[in-house]
Image (tube, helix red, strand yellow):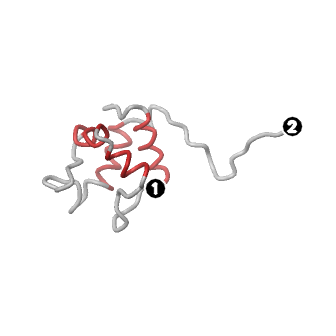
Amino acid sequence: VFSCTYDKGEVPICDNVNSSYSQSIAPIIQTKCATPNCHVHGFYLGELLTYDDVKEKVDNGSFHLRVLDLKIMPPQASPQLSSEEYQKIKCWYEAGAPNN
């Protein structure tokens, strides 16, 4: 008999807490994206100050491409997403990027 095990910690589970914009995603965006000289008011690549700002990037595909696929946001010179933060963002995105 064979069984599957995960030796590297818990398997991430997407749930309502992990996919909550207000509780999980907004704080990550505020500390990792909307920082001085990046995604703040007037930033040439766009602001990420409100849900609508973030949702615009989700809808046009740039959020998925840059954050989830290429993992170039945040840029190397900035504090990087932890694996837990990345998983929360991925869960939220896969849940349809709700404003909850």
Numbered disc 1: secondary structure: loop
Report crowding for label 2: few under 14, some 14 to 19, many 20 or more residues within 10 A (C-alpha). few
Pointer 2: what residue?
1
Q: Can you give x and y, in whole percent of width and height, for residue 12 in the image?
A: 56, 42
Q: Residue at x 74, y 42 (%)?
A: 4
Where residue 95 sits: x, y (%)? 42, 32
Vertical side of 7 occupied by 100: above or below: above
* Residue type marked 1: Ser
Residue under circle 1? 82
**Furthest residue toward left:** 42
Image coordinates for residue 57, horizontal then vertical, percent: 28, 43
Relative to the observer, which residue lies in front, 16 or 75? 75
Which residue is at 86% across, 37% downward?
1
The residue nearer to you, when weighing 9 against 39, is: 39
Instruction: Decide: few, some or many residues near mark 1? Use Cα within 10 Å; few <14, some 14-19, many ≥20.
Output: few
**Residue 35 horizontal/vertical position (percent):** 25, 58
Q: Earlier in the sequence, mark 1 or mark 2?
A: 2
Q: Amino acid at mark 2?
A: Val
Q: Relative to residue 16, is residue 74 drawn left or right?
A: left
Left or right, 70 with reference to 61: right
